[in-house]
């Protein structure tokens, strides 16, 4: 492996989707698959997480295996990251904390499944991901926000916060398992090199993050009728279990995988892989733009 230098194309990968988004039995293999995908496109993967109080930016295979075998993995967002480090805990980083740690190391691109956002319902549950994007100049490649959120409110919040939302090959904001919504993006790009040039200047110009979104690959997308049924079932199950706060998203994802007979899991894995591939292409394009 080559030693990373300042102009190397690097892609940050998060650990929350590994620890809390997919079944633990397949998580290690999936982590390796994602890292390989980044390498095959000419960039360096940097999987990020906190192992026994140590924030690791670019975990080794052994460290990822050690991390995923821990019985208890906390979920770190911007508010609890510091305390978890202080307490020597093992913690998975969400989008908010992955971009915080990656940016400190000079990385500019992160790829994930979907960002957090504004939850449905009456209490004011809004993901720290949205606010982190206003403070940290990173491009986050995703398939929009998770379908279980209030997607329209999340799109509005990004606009209010001044976070550009770029559609890659799409005119509308995708919603994770669903390919489209009626919500517009700020601009559409169809060419990774062109988008790389834009991102390189936009991140520096604003000092804020940019959301780059593309829809889940068509073959793995969920159709809306199925989705509505499955979500109702999953929400009911999680409400009966009494989950609140940070636990809600992972618990609903798990219930959905179950109720949909694996269809939401397949869609989730598929969209993450596609986003990681695009993230690598963008990181390469951005490193060329800097030359
Ligand atoms: N993408 C996935 N699965 C996930 C996530 C993203 O395919 O589990 C995670 C990300 O880490 C994101 C988090 O930051 O879900 C949002 O959690 P919350 O709604 O609690 O902020
Ligand atoms: Mn929340």
Image (cartoon, helix red, strand yellow):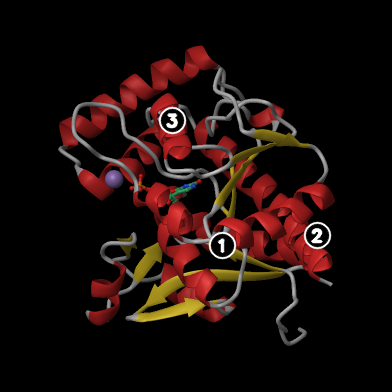
* Nearer mark to the viewer, of 1 and 2: 2
In this rendering, the count of numbered labels is 3
Decide if ligand 1 comes within 8 Å of the CB at mark 2: no
Disc 2 target residue: 285
**Crowding near pointer 3: few (<14 within 10 Å), some, many (20+)?**
few
> Is residue 161 in view?
yes
Which label number is shown at residue 13?
A: 1
* Nearer mark to the viewer, of 1 and 3: 3
Disc 3 target residue: 156
Relative to 145, is 141 above or below? below
Residue in front for this viewpoint, 32 or 245: 245
Q: Locate residue 87 relative to residue 282 in the image: left or right.
A: left
Relative to 177, is 16 above or below? below
Which label number is shown at residue 276?
A: none
Q: Give the Cα separation between the discs numbered 2 and 3.
A: 29 Å
Q: Give the Cα separation between the discs numbered 1 and 2.
A: 18 Å
* Nearer mark to the viewer, of 2 and 3: 3
Displayed quadrant of residue 33:
bottom right
Decide if ligand 1 comes within 8 Å of the CB at mark 3: no
Q: Give the Cα separation between the discs numbered 1 and 3.
A: 26 Å
Q: Earlier in the sequence, mark 1 or mark 2?
A: 1
**Label 3 near label 2: C-beta < 8 Å?**
no
Q: Earlier in the sequence, mark 1 or mark 3?
A: 1
Q: Locate residue 9 relative to residue 13 in the image: left or right.
A: right
**Label 3 near label 1: C-beta < 8 Å?**
no
Instruction: Report the quarter where the N terminus lies.
Output: bottom right
Q: Earlier in the sequence, mark 2 or mark 3?
A: 3
**Crowding near pointer 1: few (<14 within 10 Å), some, many (20+)?**
many
């Amino acid at each position: 492996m080559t030693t990373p230098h300042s102009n190397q194309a690097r892609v940050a990968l998060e650990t929350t989707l590994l620890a809390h988004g997919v079944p633990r039995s397949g998580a290690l293999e999936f982590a390796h698959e994602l890292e390989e995908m980044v390498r095959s496109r000419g960039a360096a993967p940097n999987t990020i997480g906190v192992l026994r109080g140590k924030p690791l930016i670019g975990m080794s295979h052994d460290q990822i295996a050690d991390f995923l075998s821990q019985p208890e993995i906390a979920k770190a967002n911007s508010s609890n990251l510091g305390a978890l480090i202080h307490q020597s805990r093992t913690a998975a980083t969400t989008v908010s904390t992955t971009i915080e740690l990656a940016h400190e190391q000079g990385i500019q691109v992160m790829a994930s499944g979907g960002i957090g956002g504004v939850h449905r319902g009456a209490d004011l549950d809004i993901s720290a991901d949205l606010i982190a994007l206003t403070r940290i100049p990173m491009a986050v490649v995703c398939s929009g926000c998770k379908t279980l959120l209030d997607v329209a409110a999340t799109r509005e919040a990004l606009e209010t916060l001044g976070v550009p939302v770029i559609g890659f090959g799409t005119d509308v904001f995708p919603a994770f398992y669903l390919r489209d919504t009626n919500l517009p993006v700020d601009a559409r790009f169809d060419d990774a090199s062109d988008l790389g040039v834009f991102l390189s200047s936009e991140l520096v110009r604003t000092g804020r993050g940019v959301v780059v979104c593309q829809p889940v690959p068509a073959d793995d997308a969920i159709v809306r009728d199925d989705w509505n049924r499955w979500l109702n079932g999953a929400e009911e199950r999680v409400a009966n279990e009494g989950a609140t706060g940070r636990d809600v998203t992972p618990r609903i994802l798990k219930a959905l995988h179950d109720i949909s007979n694996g269809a939401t899991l397949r869609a989730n894995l598929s969209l993450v892989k596609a986003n990681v591939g695009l993230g690598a292409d963008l990181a390469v394009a951005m490193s060329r733009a800097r030359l």
